[in-house]
Structures are given as structure tokens and as C-alpha cells.
């Protein structure tokens, strides 16, 4: 069941969104050759503690047997790693790409966003992959102004990726978000028979979703590493990930995890 949010609830979600945005601003300044993913994670965790934000990823899933809990406040996925990479002491190198995903709960409401960062100068074909992934997200965002069903948008996203010679990851999809990180509906970046019913929800005021295209340079197939979390491309080629939390209002879609400029950090504490 999709729980539509009121204007007041969306305003509360905006606070969580701003914290997530600030976390990415911290990461943006730190991403450089010689810096480890563990260092970046530690800085973001310190910021979350400072503003009283509850990280959504750390210790997820809670109390589930047979799977170790995720140990960090961010997912850090390098190069061929698609999603759910675990931060560690590995240092970034020039030419790497780093997909950083993080989310928090503030005042009972959640925000979630991911960005793929270039580490120094990256290969032109990889830079194009990152650009197309971001463009795929913003294509979806703009289509939310005019389309009535998500399936129409998902089809356009997949076609855009295919037209550029890339593949859309189909093992993972976006999601509704609110008081919980994962709510209905599922938000696919493609159209398939199995997701046709869940992926054909209406675009209407009160809908809040995390849209997150994951795009691979080669095959769409992925596999999980022995850490039980990190997902990598089956062919070892690079992958990019871009995500933001979007709320649909009476005036159209709005981005909850991107701040206007100039940004007033005091907003986070009000």
C-alpha cells in the first residue's frame, strides 16, 4: 500500500533530505586520491552525530539471521562495484569512480541519496557513463511533471540508457520512502512483466519516492562478493549510481535531497 504524504509531512522529510545533501557536500570535498573510503564514512558519521541524525544503513537489516548487518553509515562502491560496497581502508586512486549512497532519519522521517564521484581525472568513456546515469535520473524527474504512470517514466529511462549503449541494472530498484527507508511502491528503472503491477503506480501529489538508476558500462548482470553485501558487475566493467528523494506536490515534483543555493545549515536544526 502506498502511503501518500501531506504537505506537513513532506516538509519534515525535507529536513532529513537536507542532512543527506550536506553529507554529500562533505564527501565531495574529501574525494581525492589517497583518501580512504573509511575516512569519508567517518566524517559523515561524525556529522550525523552532530545534528542528531539516525543513519539508515548502519546495522541494517536489524536482527536478520543469516546475513551480517551493514557496518557503516554509507555504502561506498568503487568502479565495478554497483551498490552496497563497505567502506574500508582502501585508498582512492586517480581514475576511480566512487558511488556513495547514504540516508538518515530525522524527527521520524527519512531521506536517501546517492551520487557517483570522479576521483581525479577519469577515462572519457567512464565520465560519459557517469553523466548518462545522472541524466537518466533527471529525465525521470522531468517526466514526473507530465506523465501519469511510473511505467511510462521507467520505459523512457531504460530506452535512454540503451540508446547510449549501456545497460540498466535490474536486480535493484528504487523505492517509496517515508517513516521507513523502504516503503511501497517499488520504483523500477525499466519495465518488466514481473514489476508491471508495482511499477505502474500513479504520479500524484503526496507520492514520495527514491529514484535511483544504476547503469553499467557492460552487462546488466551483477554478483555478490563474499562479504554478503558488495554487488559487482559480472564482467568487471564500471557501474554508476545516482539517486535522490523526490516528493510530488500540487506544483509538481520537488527534490528533497538537493539544497538551493545559498544553503543555510541552520535550517537543519529548526
Image (cartoon, grey):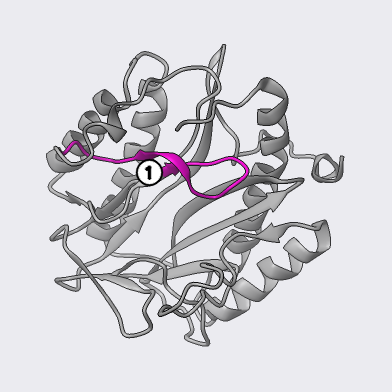
Residue 42's quadrant in the figure? bottom right
188 drawn magenta: yes
* Magenta stretch bounds: 175-192
Location of the C terminus (image quadrant):
top right
Residue at 55% from the left image edge and 73% from the top image edge: 63
The reply to whether residue 57 is in sight is yes
Residue 117 image point, x, y percent: 45, 60
Residue 103 image point, x, y percent: 59, 55
- Picture layout, residue 94 above or below residue 162: below
Left or right: residue 79 compared with residue 160: right
- Residue situated in front as seen by the camera: 225 or 27: 225
Residue at 63% from the left image edge and 48% from the top image edge: 21
Location of the N terminus (image quadrant):
top left
- Residue situated in front as seen by the camera: 97 or 53: 53
Left or right: residue 212 compared with residue 87: left
- Residue situated in front as seen by the camera: 193 or 90: 193
- Picture layout, residue 95 above or below residue 8: below
Q: Which residue is mark 1?
A: 134
Residue 60 image point, x, y percent: 54, 68
Q: Main secondary structure of the magenta part?
A: loop
Left or right: residue 201 compared with residue 32: left
Residue 123's quadrant in the figure? bottom left
- Picture layout, residue 251 above or below residue 195: above
Q: Secondary structure at mark 1?
A: helix
- Residue situated in front as seen by the camera: 80 or 6: 6
151 drawn magenta: no
Residue 186 image point, x, y percent: 36, 41
Amino acid at each position: 500500500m502506498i502511503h501518500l504524504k501531506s504537505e506537513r509531512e513532506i516538509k519534515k522529510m525535507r529536513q532529513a533530505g537536507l542532512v543527506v545533501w550536506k553529507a554529500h557536500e562533505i564527501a565531495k570535498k574529501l574525494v581525492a586520491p589517497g583518501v580512504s573510503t573509511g575516512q569519508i564514512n567517518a566524517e559523515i558519521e561524525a556529522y550525523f552525530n552532530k545534528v542528531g541524525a539516525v543513519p539508515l544503513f548502519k546495522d541494517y537489516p536489524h536482527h536478520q539471521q543469516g546475513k551480517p548487518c551493514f557496518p557503516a553509515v554509507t555504502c561506498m562502491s568503487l568502479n565495478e562495484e554497483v551498490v552496497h560496497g563497505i567502506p574500508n581502508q582502501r585508498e582512492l586512486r586517480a581514475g576511480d569512480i566512487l558511488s556513495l549512497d547514504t540516508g538518515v532519519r530525522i524527527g521520524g522521517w527519512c531521506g536517501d541519496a546517492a551520487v557517483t564521484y570522479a576521483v581525479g581525472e577519469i577515462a572519457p568513456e567512464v565520465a560519459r557513463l557517469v553523466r548518462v546515469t545522472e541524466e537518466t535520473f533527471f529525465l525521470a524527474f522531468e517526466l514526473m511533471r507530465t506523465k501519469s504512470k511510473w511505467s511510462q517514466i521507467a520505459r523512457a529511462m531504460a530506452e535512454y540508457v540503451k540508446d547510449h549503449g549501456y545497460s540498466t541494472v535490474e536486480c535493484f530498484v528504487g523505492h517509496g520512502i517515508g517513516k521507513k527507508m523502504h516503503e511501497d511502491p517499488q520504483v523500477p528503472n525499466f519495465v518488466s512483466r514481473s514489476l508491471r503491477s508495482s511499477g505502474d503506480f500513479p504520479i500524484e501529489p503526496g507520492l514520495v519516492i527514491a529514484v535511483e538508476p544504476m547503469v553499467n558500462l557492460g552487462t546488466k548482470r551483477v554478483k555478490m562478493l563474499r562479504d554478503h553485501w558488495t554487488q559487482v558487475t559480472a564482467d568487471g566493467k564500471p557501474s554508476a549510481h545516482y539517486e535522490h528523494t523526490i516528493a510530488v506536490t500540487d506544483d509538481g515534483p520537488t527534490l528533497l535531497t538537493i539544497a538551493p543555493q545559498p544553503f543555510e545549515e541552520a535550517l537543519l536544526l529548526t
